[in-house]
Image (cartoon, helix red, strand yellow):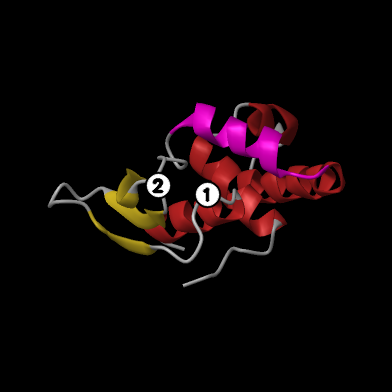
């Protein structure tokens, strides 16, 4: 999946984007989402940078994985790490995984990852 598709899939999984329109924001290359709010009308919001921000990914993992999904997430993270690093210290590498590695494992856990 490309970066923007991952960011959109994670945001949708977290429930803050539903049936909205995605577009490049004012030539900046940033992805913006537009939505409708009955009180505010149309609004623009920048998608969080899940793939580079560990704080954002840790928030996602803590708030949007059910207890029953956590073991599967750890298995998926180990597979992501193993494929990328091919080292015997998988446990340590999982603890120190990058935001993008955590994002991929999260999407795979929820069966939202698509290979391109």
Outermost residue toward the left?
A: 27
Please state if 43 lies on the left or on the right of 81 as rendered.
Answer: left
Residue 68 vs residue 100, the one in the foreground: 68
Q: Is 54 contained in the magenta span?
A: yes
**Who's the residue at 42% across and 36% down the image?**
52
**Who's the residue at 68% across and 64% down the image?**
111
Dot 1 corresponds to which residue?
A: 16
Residue 75 appears in the rendering: yes
- Tell me residue 112's x, y (percent): 61, 63
- Tell me residue 47's x, y (percent): 39, 46
Residue 3 vs residue 78, the one in the foreground: 3
- Tell me residue 32's x, y (percent): 30, 51
**Who's the residue at 38% across and 56% down the image?**
35
The local secondary structure at tag 1 comes to loop
Please state if 71 lies on the left or on the right of 116 as rendered.
Answer: right
**Who's the residue at 77% across and 48% down the image?**
75
Which residues are the magenta region? 53-66
The local secondary structure at tag 2 comes to loop
Dot 2 corresponds to which residue?
A: 39
């Amino acid at each position: 999946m490309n970066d923007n598709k991952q960011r959109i899939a994670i945001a949708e999984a977290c429930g803050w984007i539903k049936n909205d329109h995605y577009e490049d924001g004012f030539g900046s290359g940033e992805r913006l989402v537009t939505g409708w709010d009955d009180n505010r009308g149309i609004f623009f919001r920048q998608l969080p940078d899940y793939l580079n921000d560990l704080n954002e990914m840790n928030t996602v993992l803590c708030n949007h994985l059910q207890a029953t999904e956590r073991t599967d997430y750890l298995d998926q993270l180990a597979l992501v790490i193993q494929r990328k690093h091919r080292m015997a210290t998988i446990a340590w590498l999982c603890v120190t995984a990058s935001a993008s590695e955590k994002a991929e494992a999260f999407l795979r856990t929820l069966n939202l990852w698509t290979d391109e």
